[in-house]
Image: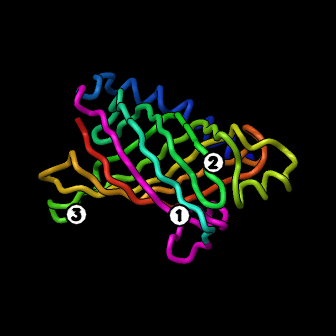
Amino acid sequence: MKRFVFALATIAVVTPAFAQFDTSPVPSEDQKVFIFGGRMGESDMAGMLNPFTAEYEEAIVLGGGYQHFLIEPIEDLKFGLEAGAAVRTGEETTGEVWGGVVGRYDGFVVGDTLRISPSLTFGASAVTGTMGTEAEREAIDGLPGDFLFYLSPEISFSSVENPSSEVFWRLHHRSGAWNTFGGGGSANATTIGIRTSF
């Protein structure tokens, strides 16, 4: 809890400080669209970080989104906005929408050919209804899980020659963040996807 609050406070303080170095806007072509799909998990968020050892439920998530990067305070570090929507289907089918702030770093290059770009999106997520493991956790917490905190760490891969086309792995996570935001329950999915810039 204290670490979570500290992290948010740090981001709130550091981001404006970075912006003082260079407030030049990112070129207008730095907009991205993406699609992804994957399996929803029974494991908690920490357990889902390793997709090969995570425990899964019989449900999948299919979705897509849009990113618009607005500032590049230091070289290769960008901040912008993200919005997306997904369908989650298993024994039940529900819809999800989310929006938030995204930070991305494009400075890792291997052998002058492969670019590795970690990013993190955080914001809010709303669903038409909880399902599966998420619904079970919601019942245990005794709080509604329709509007929760959204967090999505990601690693994407692209060629240096064609940076506008990427493949990525992404952890799709929503929770009440220890009841500090939203209500009860949590849901996780490990996904892979593709993204293009324009």
| Residue 141 spot, x, y in % from top left | 85, 51
Q: Residues within 10 Å of mark 2 (few under 14, many from 20)?
A: many
Nearest-to-viewer mark from 3 and 1: 1
Please name the residue shown 69% across and 37% down the image.
Answer: 147
Please name the residue shown 73% across and 38% down the image.
Answer: 181
Name which of mark 3 and mark 1 comes first in the sequence: 1
Nearest-to-viewer mark from 1 and 2: 1
Secondary structure under the numbered disc 1 in the rendered image = strand
| Residue 3 spot, x, y in % from top left | 68, 48
Magenta span: 28-55
- 49 or 183, which lies in front? 183
Q: Residues within 10 Å of mark 1 (few under 14, many from 20)?
A: many
Tag 3 near tag 2, CB within 8 Å: no
Secondary structure under the numbered disc 3 in the rendered image = strand
| Residue 128 spot, x, y in % from top left | 66, 39
* Amino acid type for the residue under numbered disc 2: Arg
Drawn side of residue 8 relative to residue 80, left or right: right
Drawn side of residue 121 relative to residue 77, left or right: right
| Residue 149 spot, x, y in % from top left | 65, 41
- The residue beneath circle 3 is 110
Is residue 72 found inside the magenta-colored segment of the image?
A: no
- The residue beneath circle 1 is 39
- The residue beneath circle 2 is 174
Tag 3 near tag 1, CB within 8 Å: no
- 93 or 102, which lies in front? 93
Is residue 43 found inside the magenta-colored segment of the image?
A: yes
- 119 or 67, which lies in front? 67
* Amino acid type for the residue under numbered disc 3: Val
Name which of mark 1 and mark 2 comes first in the sequence: 1
